[in-house]
Image (cartoon, grey):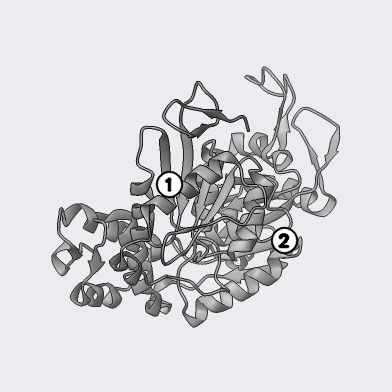
Amino acid sequence: MAQAMTTQGAFPFRNETANTIAVVVLSPNQALRRELMGKLRSPHWRITEAESGADALDKLGANETDLLLLDPRLPDLDSTEFSALVRMQFPDVQIVTVNSHTGQPLLRSSSPTPLAVHVVEVLERSGALPTSTTAAYQPEGEEADGLPGMVGNSEPMQRVYAVTRLVARRDTTVVVTGESGTGKDLVAKAVHLLSGRRSNPFVVINCAAIPEPLLEAELFGYVKGAFTGAVQSRIGRIHAAQGGTLFLDEIGEMPLALQSKLLRFLEQGEVQRLGSSDNFRVDVRVVAATNSDLRKLVEQRSFREDLYFRLAVFPIKLPPLRERTSDIPALAASFVRRFCTAGACVTPEALNILQQHLWPGNVRELRNVIERSGILMGESRDVTPEHIIL
C-alpha cells in the first residue's frame, strides 16, 4: 500500500489524490465505538462502524478499507481467528487492536506501518476512555460457542451453535430448517465462515425469488444463443461459487423439473450450461434452507425424495423465538443499539410486553418492532411501552 505524507504533520495517506483514510471501527460496545470515532474525527478519515465480526467482514468486503480498529471482545468470533480471516481475505487492511476497557491501542506487529503508528499516536494522545463509557459495557452474546451474527444463549440456541460448528469443518451438505424469520441465512453464512472455504465465494440464490424460466439459467449458466436474449455466454451461480459455498435459500420452492438437474450436480459435482453438451467439474459445498416441511412436500410429490435425502445429510433445525424467550432481552438490546438513540435501553415494562408476545414472525418481527420503536421514541432515552407496536 503506497504511503504519502501531508503538510499537516506526519499523516500517512494511501495515496496523494484520495487524501482519505478509510477506517472500520469494530466493537460490540456502541459507547466504545463512538468514543474511538470521535477521537479520529477529521476530514481525512472516512469511518464506518461494525458491531460484530460478521458485520465487519461485510463492511470490509463492500468498500476498500485501509485500517481496522479491533476490540478483541467480539460477540461472534474469536478475535485471533477473526484477525487471521481478515489478513487472508483483505491483506492490505492494517489491524490495530484496542483495549476493550481503556480504548488504548495495542500494537502487536513487529514492523507496524506508518498508518498504524499514526493511529496509535492519535489514540494515545487522547488518553483512556471515560469510566462511564467502559463501565456501561455489558458485552452481549459473548459466549465463545456462538455463531457469527447470532445473538442468544438459550439452551436451544446452544445446541444449534454446537452442531453448526461441528459440521462447518467438513464439506457435508447441510439443510437448515425453521420458521420464517428465525435466522436460517445466518446459520448458512456461519457454516461458510467457520469452514476451510471461508476465503472463497459465498453465493446466494433464492429459489422462490427467481421466475422458473430463469432459475435454470441462473443456476447453471448458458452459452451464447441458448435462448432468445442469450447474446453472450455466462457461467451460473453454481460455477461462480467454485471453491466456496452455494446457499440455496427456499429450496422447497424449486420447480420439480429443475430438481433432477440439481440432484445430478450434487451427486457428480458437474454442471452443464444451457445450450452446451460440455460438463464442468466444480468444487462447491451446498447449504440449503427452507421454512417448508420437506417430508410433506415429498409425500405430496412436489419434492423429489432422492433430492431430499441428498440434501438432508446433516439437518439443522432453528427454534422459533417463542421457544427461546430468554434470548429476547439480548436480541432486543442488540436491535436497540442498531436502531435507537445512542445509549437507549428497553424499560422493564416494555421488555415484559416483548416477552409476552408469541412472535409469529420470529426474530425478524422483533427487529421490525424495535426499528419502529426507534422512530417513535424520538429523542427519548428509553424504549417504553408506548413505543412498542405489535
Residue with the mark numbered 1 = 122
User: Judging from the image, what secondary structure is the residue with disc 1 in?
Assistant: helix
User: Judging from the image, what secondary structure is the residue with disc 2 in?
Assistant: loop
Residue with the mark numbered 2 = 173
Which residue: 55% across, 26% down?
15
Count of numbered badges drawn on the protein: 2
Q: Of the residues tagged 1 and 2, which is closer to the observer? A: 1
Residue 42: mark in rendering: none
* Most distant residue in the bottom direction: 155
Whether residue 35 sits left or right of residue 293 in the image: it is left
Dividing the picture into quadrants, the one containing residue 193 is: bottom right
Cα gap from disc 1 to disc 2, whole angstroms: 48 Å
Q: Residues within 10 Å of mark 2 (few under 14, many from 20)?
A: many
Which residue: 45% across, 73% down?
152
Vertical order, 224 against 313 (above or below) = above
- Where is residue 263 drawn, in percent x and y? 75, 52
| Amino acid tagged 1 | Val
Which residue: 26% across, 57% down?
342
Q: Residues within 10 Å of mark 1 (few under 14, many from 20)?
A: few
- Where is residue 89 drawn, in percent x and y? 66, 46
| Amino acid tagged 2 | Thr
* Most distant residue in the top direction: 231
